[in-house]
Amino acid sequence: MAEIRDWKLSETNLSRAQQIPYEVAVLPIGATEAHNLHLPYGTDTFQVEAIAERACAAAWEQGAEVLLLPSIPVGINENTLGFPWTLSYKPTTILQMLRDTVGCLEQHRLMKLLVLNGHGGNELKAFLRELFRETKVQMILVDWWTVDPQALQTAFDDPGEHGGEMETSLMLHLRPDLVEMEQADEGEVRKPHFTGMREGWAWVARPWDILTTNSGVGNPAASTAKKGQQFLQRCVDKIAQLIVEMANEPMDDWYPYERD
């Protein structure tokens, strides 16, 4: 019989949870969208849940009283709906989910929240700014794939942006049963016409059904499970360290900054 993991809300129970003074909550947010032709629609959610679980388990082993919340499996995908069966919540819906979650945490006096984002389209900084004056819960945001830029560049020939080498390698490690490499295309993208967009200082919400052939950005051909495992572990270790630091830091007016 599997052991109940007290750090995972969906597995623990009231008799156990009410005895633990949880210090940090972790909220993973993923997406449900096409990922090239060879990866499952739940790629972003599979990845962020796996990283959250492993990071919480590692932090718990180091003494951090962390509570992993159920993930939000649908993200902001308004500009990728051109591909069949992609699901999207509007930004205002995600904001309200965050607001409601934070309200529950405040009710239960759990005042530290790590929002672990698993989807590039979930641009959440503005949401945390909007909630800043509404709640006493202290929120920290992490886009998990950004925590170790050096490891990202050294682990992969070309990480790619969407369904490329990085994401495919992680899925070959996490869920190889759901990866159909023989179906993958090369992930080429249409180049922008305007100079500012080419140089990176002009931005547009990209229509992915026009930008890409089959939703992929980046060639997955060089992907391996070993690359995915090594990069995932680097990210897990750094996120676990952050959770431990959050748990150990006193909750006062200075949190999360150094004191005078």
Image (cartoon, grey):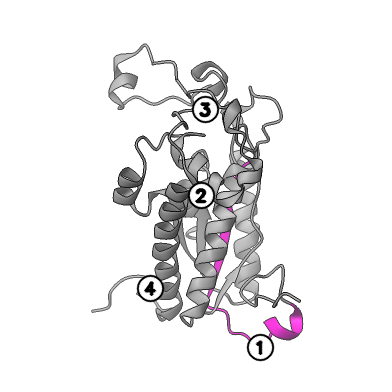
- Residue in the image at 57% along x and 44% along y: 44
User: Which residue lies under the disc numbered 2?
Assistant: 127
Give amino acid for label 4. Answer: Tyr
User: Which residue lies under the disc numbered 4?
Assistant: 255
Q: CA distance from mark 1 to mark 4?
A: 25 Å
Question: In terms of secondary structure, where does tag 2 sit?
Answer: helix
Q: Nearer the viewer, mark 2 or mark 1?
A: 1
Q: CA distance from mark 4 to mark 2?
A: 20 Å
Quarter of the image for the N terminus: give it.
Answer: bottom right
Whether residue 134 is situated above or below residue 41 in the rendered picture:
below
Q: Which mark is residue 216?
A: 3
Question: In terms of secondary structure, where does tag 4 sit?
Answer: loop
Question: In terms of secondary structure, where does tag 3 sit?
Answer: loop
Give amino acid for label 1. Answer: Gln
- Residue in the image at 31% along x and 43% along y: 153
Outermost bottom residue: 19
Q: CA distance from mark 2 to mark 1?
A: 32 Å
Q: Name which of mark 4 and mark 2 comes first in the sequence.
A: 2
Instruction: Give the image location of residue 228, x and y in percent.
Output: 46, 49
Q: Name which of mark 1 and mark 3 comes first in the sequence.
A: 1
Q: Nearer the viewer, mark 1 or mark 3?
A: 3
Q: Name which of mark 2 and mark 3 comes first in the sequence.
A: 2
Q: Which mark is residue 222?
A: none
Give amino acid for label 3. Answer: Gly
Instruction: Give the image location of residue 180, x and y in percent.
Output: 62, 34
Please name whichever residue, 95 or 67, is drawn nearer the observer in this view of the structure: 67
Outermost top residue: 193
Q: Which residues are magenta?
A: 13-31
